[in-house]
Amino acid sequence: MKRFEMKKLGIIFVIACLLMTGCTGSENSGAYKEAVREPAAGEGFDYMADDVEPAVEEAQDTAKSDEANADASNSSGKSAQQSNTTNKVDKEKLVFRCSMVIDTLEYTESIKSFRNLIKKYDGFVENENESDDGTTNGYYYYDEMKQGKRHSTYTATVRIPSARYDDFCEETGGIGEVRTRNANVENVSQSYYNLQAELEVLEAKYQRYLEMLKKAVTTKDIIEIENTITNIEVQINQIKTQLNRYDNDVAYSYVSVTIKEVEKIVQEEEQGTVSNAFSGSMEAFGEVCHSLFIIFIYFLPYLIVILVILIIVWLATMPVRKKHKAAKKLAKEKQAATLGGQAQMTPPADVKPSEQEKK
């Protein structure tokens, strides 16, 4: 009986040990999977049974190192944010933009001077366009019609080193009469430093996934980690592209220039004077007369054709008109002769008979 009880107690002890070992193994396995699983997928990596024991220890070490790295990244992130804040105070990321419209009497010379200024200030042309607009607005319509030409317009967007931006704009305004000028400054510091912080986080994450890829065994785990690494690489490249764009915009300012060819330069202060009003009225009268002449020239071929048709019709109907005219003349003569004979036979009603005629 005692032996049976001793055997029973021994079996219970063995079962308890097995249960404790199973629980500990499952917990360690869960910790390992949690340490190496892909966060996005939420699935653990299955390793071979022979490697479970060393893998558990390695996973625990990896988890500890990840926690340490996370703390280090948080502290580095805070320090990076502090340094970024200091950088923002020390040096703002500013993008300068300016647009101006310039009137000129010497169109070709103005374009040449503008291009020389671009070379002088080490800039480059981003895009440009030149056209004959034939504008009929304002004070150069009359010259266009009189000279028989269309006035040209040149537009360009150039990039100038930001350190020389003000000098370039000032000198560009001297190639003609500046009609409008708009300038603004965009501060991209916050977006720039936010992207930098995000880039640091993604690069740290990228390195961790590379380490996880070295430890992966199954094909499924390798494919999942490689897909995640590819997505992180795409995000890193996008952020780097945006940062490069910001760096270029900060280094080279935008200047948009429109150069218009005009007949004459009218100053702002001259527009309300009596002499300017009189000259404007005379120009308007000349424009009306010239427009009427242009309209006449435009319809002249049609008028010539109509005139030729009228001449042909007149010549064709000339015999009929002559015959009709002769008949009409003859009728009038007959009528006049008839009226003359009647007048001789009938005495006038107001003539009284004499005394002898009465007897």
Image: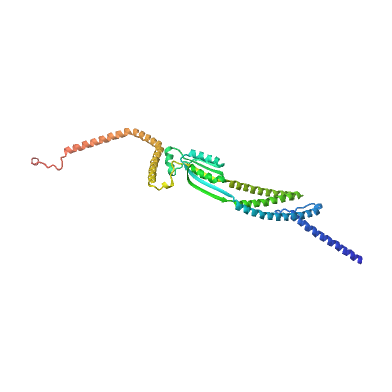
Instruction: Give the camera-side residue of 277 and 333.
Output: 277
Instruction: Give the camera-side residue of 89 and 348.
Output: 89
329 w.r.t. 171: above or below: above
Left or right, 296 with respect to 256, comes to: left
Figure quadrant of residue 18: bottom right
- Looking at this rendering, what residue extends furthest in the bottom direction? 1
**How many discs appear?**
0
Instruction: Give the camera-side residue of 218 and 319.
Output: 218
331 w.r.t. 202: above or below: above
Q: Position of residue 79 (x, y in %)?
A: 66, 54
Figure quadrant of residue 66: bottom right
Quadrant of the snapshot with the C terminus: top left
Left or right, 67 with respect to 319, comes to: right
| Residue found 87% across the figure and 64% down from its top | 9
Left or right, 14 with respect to 72, comes to: right
Q: Position of residue 57 (x, y in %)?
A: 79, 55
| Residue found 68% across the figure and 55% down from its top | 75
Q: Position of residue 42 (x, y in %)?
A: 72, 55
Quadrant of the snapshot with the N terminus: bottom right
Q: Position of residue 7 (x, y in %)?
A: 89, 63
267 w.r.t. 340: above or below: below
65 w.r.t. 152: above or below: below
| Residue found 67% across the figure and 51% down from its top | 200
Figure quadrant of residue 329: top left
Say whether residue 190 is visible: no
Say whether residue 83 is visible: yes
